[in-house]
Image (spheres, rainbow, N blue to C red):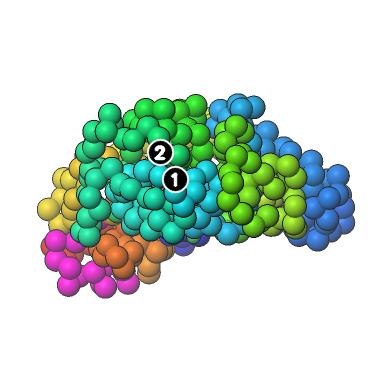
Amino acid sequence: MTVYNFSAGPAALPMAVKQQIADELFDWQGTGCSVMEVSHRSPEFVNLAEHTEQLARELIGISDDYAVMFIQGGARTQYAMLPMNLSSPQGQAVYAVNGHWGKLALKEGGRFTQAITTAPVSETTYASIPDYEADEIPQTANYFHYTSNETLEGVQWSKPPECGAVPLCCDMTSDLLSREFDMNRHAMIYASAQKNMGIAGITFVALRKDLIGQSANLIPMMNDYQTYANSGSMYNTPPTFPWYVMNLVLQWVKGQGGLAGIQRINRQKSGLLYEYVDRSDFYQNMVSKNCRSEVNVPFWLADESLNQAFLDNSAAAGLKALKGHKAVGGMRASIYNAIPEAGIEALISFMQEFERTHG
Ligand SMILES: Cc1ncc(COP(=O)(O)O)c(C=O)c1O
């Protein structure tokens, strides 16, 4: 039986990437060792690290004005590193909050700087992006932070927000590499890898070089962007295996036609699923159509008493991890880059059959 893994993260890897990992596991690049066993200072690994950076720059469109860094501690560590490095306890930072992760970024940011929001933070489930007046954003703020794709709620910005001259910083953990976007509008982007970029343990960060090393705060070496920028992200022993997997994933993305090619496929996949959910009275998605996520599609059964049966039957049919996050409920299909169109077709067929037998 073909299994499709709709997990929100750690998430499915492309089959070709898994195959290459298996093929190279016992002898990576003729070293006679696995990539996990060689020094991060070896010529082979340094080569891989440089190639990874170069591929990411090429695919995402990151110019030499930015430093590219590979950092441990997940996206959550960036919630603290960002204010520590770019602001101060007296400084101000603006957060656009339109879901679970943005709310947590704001909370952590508030421990290190004066963190304000563009709109009151709602306690309810987010189904749209709150409006705000861009010309009211204080231009003295050290940065403006947003979450391009809210993984739990399935709410995605269609284009970067307006914030004047304030440096724009983005948590792209769940949609980096899934679509094209204007890198040059951003001062910083970051994404932990375990959704579209590989496996847990490494976070990709691109930050404008002029913003590095400007802070008067006392910052631990391991939380200072300058440490990573000055050392090729090898001040301490880096997460070599996740770095290697990211390299393979980037090569795979390039083979799919880069971000433009991937975006075409992802639009097609998510379009099919939303179209079916919207046509059905049995399932629904409550997110406003102008900000529906192309990579996380939450949906609810009209009769919630059928939730467990839906989950049991879908898992038995090889459609794994469709349960929505507990903060949101319902179901969620995370359809990142590695899920092929055939996976969406299998999911829709299952949903139709479940509707027919339980509706
Ligand atoms: C948008 C977003 N931001 C942040 C995180 C947290 O990432 P990490 O667990 O790598 O810290 C997640 C994880 O699901 C996420 O989806």
Q: Badge 2: how crowded within 10 Å, few (<14), some, or many (20+)?
A: some
Res. 217 in view: yes
The residue indicated by pointer 1 is 91
- Counting from the top left corner in percent of width and height, residue 270 is at 33, 42
- Counting from the top left corner in percent of width and height, residue 103 is at 34, 55
Q: Secondary structure at mark 2?
A: loop
Viewer-side residue, 311 vs 163 = 163
Residue occupying image coordinates x 45% and y 28%: 185
Viewer-side residue, 57 vs 164 = 164
Query: Which residue type does callout 2 highlight?
Result: Ala
Query: Which residue type does callout 1 highlight?
Result: Gly
Viewer-side residue, 307 vs 123 = 123
Q: Badge 1: how crowded within 10 Å, few (<14), some, or many (20+)?
A: some
Res. 277 in view: no
Q: Is residue 170 above or below residue 10?
A: above
Q: Which residues are magenta?
A: 299-314
- Marking on residue 141: 2
Query: Count of labels shown?
Result: 2
Q: Secondary structure at mark 1?
A: loop
